[in-house]
C-alpha cells in the first residue's frame, strides 16, 4: 500500500533545498534576487512562474510561492495512497488546512471583508481554494464552522461545539483553541487502528500538540519574544528529527511523515531568509534557523 506513494516521495525529497542550497539563498541581497536564485531550482521554477503574474512585488511573490509550494507538495500526497493508509496521510497533512482556516477566520474577525480575504486564499492540503473561499464568505463565524464540517474535514459535531463556543462570547482565544482541538480530533479519527503506523501518527499528533502548548505557556509567562524562540527551537527540532528518520522507513508511514516534515522545515527556513532581506533580520538570527536539529 505504500510502494507507489513512497517511491514518488523518495524522488521528491531529492528536489528539496539542502543545506548548501539554503546557504546560497542566504547570499541574496534583496527579495528580487532571492526570487532569481529560487527560480534556478527545479522544484520551485514552475511555482514561481505561476505566481509571477499575480504578485505585486518580489517579497509578496516569495511569500505566496512558499505557501503554494506547501499546498502543492502536501496536497498531492493523499491521492497516492489507497485506504486505509490514505487516512493516515490525511492526518499528517491536515495541519496545513488548520493553519489556512485559522488565518482566514482571524482576518474575518479583524474586520476584513469576505472579498478581501477570498482574494488572497491559497489552497490547503485537503481544502481547495473554492472550499476555503466558501468558508471565508460565510456570513457568520458559526456558519463558517458548519461549512468546514460540510467539506468533510471536521465532523458535524465539531461545528456544533465550536458554534457554541463562539456564541458564548468568550473571545477569539478559546475559539481558536477549540478549533485546533477539533482538528486534532479529526486527525486522530483518521489514525485509528492497532498497527504501528497508526500509533506513529498518533505520537506525531501528540508531539505537535505538546509543542503548541509549550509555546502558549511561554507566551503567557515570558512574552512574545521568548515564545517565538521556543516555537522555533521546538518546531524545527521535531521536524528535523522526523525528516531525518523518513528514509529509514521506505515501506511505511515514516517516509510520508519525514517528507511532510522536510517540506514544513524548508518553508520555515525560507521565511527566515526572506525576513533577512525584507525585514532586516540579522545574519546571526537567521543562522539559528539554518542548522538541522536531528538529535
Image: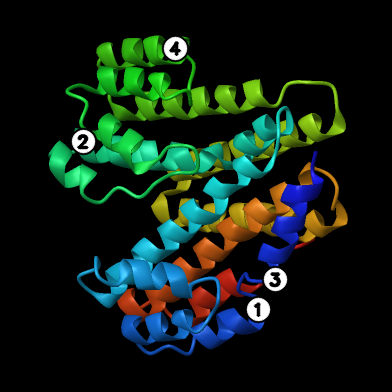
Residues 144 and 230: in front is 144
In this rendering, the answer to whether 19 lies above or below 246 is below
Secondary structure at numbered mark 4 = helix
In the picture, measured across the screen, residue 268 lies left or right of residue 31, that is right
- Residue 59 in sight: yes
**Residue at (77, 56) in percent of width and height:** 7
Circle nearer the N terminus (4, 2): 2
Tag in front: 3 or 4: 3
Residues 230 and 96: in front is 96
Q: Which residue is mark 2?
A: 108
Mark linked to residue 156? 4
**Residue at (49, 37) in percent of width and height:** 126
Mark linked to residue 14? 3
Secondary structure at numbered mark 1 = helix
Mark linked to residue 274? none
Measured from the top left, where is residue 148 in percent x and y?
38, 24
Mark linked to residue 19? 1
In this rendering, the answer to whether 120 lies above or below 265 is above
In this rendering, the answer to whether 234 lies above or below 140 is below
Distance, label 2 to label 1, CA atoms, is 38 Å
Tag in front: 3 or 2: 3
Quarter holding the N terminus is top right
Circle nearer the N terminus (2, 1): 1
Neighbour tally class for label 4: few under 14, some 14-19, many 20 plus, Cα within 10 Å: some
Circle nearer the N terminus (1, 3): 3
Quarter holding the C terminus is bottom right
CB under 8 Å between discs 1 and 3: no
Amino acid at each position: 500500500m505504500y510502494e507507489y506513494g513512497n517511491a514518488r516521495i523518495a524522488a521528491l525529497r531529492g528536489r528539496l533545498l539542502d543545506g548548501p542550497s539554503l546557504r546560497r539563498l542566504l547570499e541574496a541581497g534583496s527579495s528580487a534576487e532571492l526570487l532569481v536564485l529560487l527560480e534556478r531550482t527545479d522544484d520551485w521554477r514552475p511555482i514561481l512562474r505561476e505566481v509571477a503574474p499575480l504578485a505585486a512585488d518580489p517579497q509578496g511573490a516569495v511569500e505566496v510561492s512558499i505557501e503554494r509550494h506547501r499546498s502543492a507538495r502536501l496536497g498531492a500526497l493523499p491521492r497516492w495512497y489507497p485506504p486505509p493508509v490514505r487516512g493516515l496521510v490525511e492526518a499528517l497533512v491536515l495541519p496545513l488546512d488548520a493553519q489556512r482556516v485559522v488565518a482566514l477566520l482571524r482576518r474575518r474577525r479583524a474586520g476584513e471583508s469576505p472579498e478581501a480575504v477570498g482574494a488572497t486564499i491559497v489552497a490547503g492540503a485537503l481544502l481547495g481554494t473554492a472550499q476555503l473561499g466558501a468558508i471565508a464568505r460565510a456570513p457568520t463565524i458559526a456558519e463558517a464552522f458548519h461549512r468546514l464540517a460540510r467539506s468533510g474535514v471536521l465532523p458535524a459535531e465539531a461545528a456544533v461545539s465550536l458554534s457554541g463556543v463562539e456564541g458564548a462570547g468568550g473571545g477569539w482565544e478559546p475559539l481558536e483553541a477549540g478549533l485546533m482541538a477539533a482538528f486534532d480530533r479529526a486527525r486522530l479519527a483518521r489514525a485509528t487502528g492497532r498497527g504501528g503506523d497508526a500509533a506513529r501518527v498518533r505520537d506525531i499528533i501528540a508531539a505537535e500538540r505538546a509543542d503548541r502548548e509549550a509555546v502558549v505557556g511561554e507566551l503567557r509567562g515570558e512574552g512574545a519574544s521568548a515564545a517565538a524562540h521556543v516555537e522555533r527551537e521546538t518546531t524545527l527540532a521535531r521536524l528535523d528529527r522526523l525528516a531525518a528518520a523518513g528514509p529509514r522507513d521506505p515501506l511505511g508511514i515514516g517516509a510520508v511523515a519525514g517528507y511532510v516534515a522536510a517540506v514544513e522545515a524548508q518553508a520555515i527556513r525560507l521565511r527566515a531568509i526572506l525576513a533577512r532581506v525584507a525585514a532586516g533580520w540579522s545574519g546571526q538570527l537567521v543562522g539559528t534557523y539554518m542548522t538541522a536539529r536531528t538529535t
